Amino acid sequence: MTLTTDSVRPRRTFIFSPGLNPDMFPKALASGTDIVCVELEDGVAPKDKEAARERGLSLFTEAAHADTDVECVVRINSVRESFGLADVTAVLETDTPPPVLMMPKVRTPDEVVWLDGLLTERGHTTQLQIIIETNQALEAAYDIAHCSPRINALFFGGVDMAAELRCANAWEPLLYARSRVVHAAASAGIDAIDVPYLDLEDLDGMVVAARQAKELGFSGKGAIHPKQIAALNAVFTPSDDEIAEARRIIDTFEAADTGLVVIDGKLIEKPVLRDMYRVLAIADSAARSTSD
């Protein structure tokens, strides 16, 4: 399968924008991030949920977000809670739904299938992003990743996962959990996005954590402040050397017209070729967004 820039988009970074304060949404869109997620869940107090829902969803009745390459997402509340059911009802009632809904606290594929069915019945083309942050979701990550064609990414919820696993919120204790999320996402051909780095004053530490995540197979990492975005984008954007190597492998395969080739004494097979197309697609998309 040949990946193109139409089928792959960069998801190097994401940042939340409070649904309660829609005035911050344009600033988030202009921050340089690939994904802006309007927050209706953990960042909103119960007494403010209704107001956040109304204000957050009202952003999508306007066309402002349609003029940007930034992926616009709304994080709803858990669909197993009344606030989540109210969020879903509001999305189904509107004729201008968000392009993407992020589902938190998922436990089973059934929750995703249920929401997919409601969106389909309503005629909404809204895509889904799933946060893997519960023990049940970690166990079912592979099935969740494959349960709906609307899913375009899995997000690793490290803070909640560490609490569920009763382990430290650090790289090594969560390595197994992260690896399962990457495996599930890769098996479904979708992106895996790592949890934000929470220490705003430690940009060097954040870059190290981002590089670890990239090496493990993550497509991007969250930000909690705009000042983190440029450094994170740099980590997850293919380097000139990576782009050159991808082009060389693709050119060699196309010239050979076989299922495998030998480059610099190393055997290269077609799964590597798919990854090389992905590298070029992300590089091309990132270059377009930067030029815009």
Image: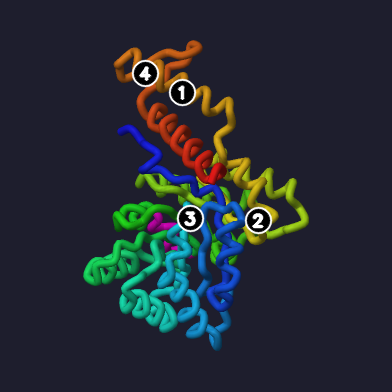
Magenta span contains residue 137 = yes
Q: CA distance from mark 3 to mark 2?
A: 26 Å
Image quadrant holding the N terminus, namely top left
The residue located at (55%, 42%) in the rendering is 291
Q: What span is colored magenta in the figure?
A: 134-141
Look at the numbered discs 3 and 1 and tell me whether their residues touch, using CB distance below 8 Å: no
Closer to the N terminus: mark 3 or mark 1? 3
The residue located at (46%, 14%) in the rendering is 263
Residue designated by label 4: 253
Query: Which percent across, then down, holds residue 187?
Result: 37, 44
Closer to the N terminus: mark 4 or mark 2? 2
Closer to the N terminus: mark 1 or mark 4? 1
The amino acid type, in three-letter code, at marker 4 is Phe
Residue designated by label 3: 68
Residue 17 vertical position relative to residue 266 in the rendered view, above or below: below
Look at the numbered discs 3 and 4 and tell me whether their residues touch, using CB distance below 8 Å: no
The residue located at (30%, 57%) in the rendering is 148
Residue 226 vertical position relative to residue 290 in the rendered view, above or below: below
Disc 4, SS: helix
The figure's colour scheme reads rainbow
Magenta span contains residue 151 = no
Closer to the N terminus: mark 3 or mark 4? 3
Query: Which percent across, then down, holds residue 88?
Result: 36, 76
Q: Which mark is residue 247?
A: 1
Query: Which percent across, then down, holds residue 31?
Result: 61, 56
The amino acid type, in three-letter code, at marker 1 is Arg
The residue located at (33%, 32%) in the rendering is 2
Q: CA distance from mark 3 to mark 1?
A: 29 Å
Residue 278 vertical position relative to residue 144 in the rendered view, above or below: above
Q: Residues within 10 Å of mark 1 (few under 14, many from 20)?
A: some
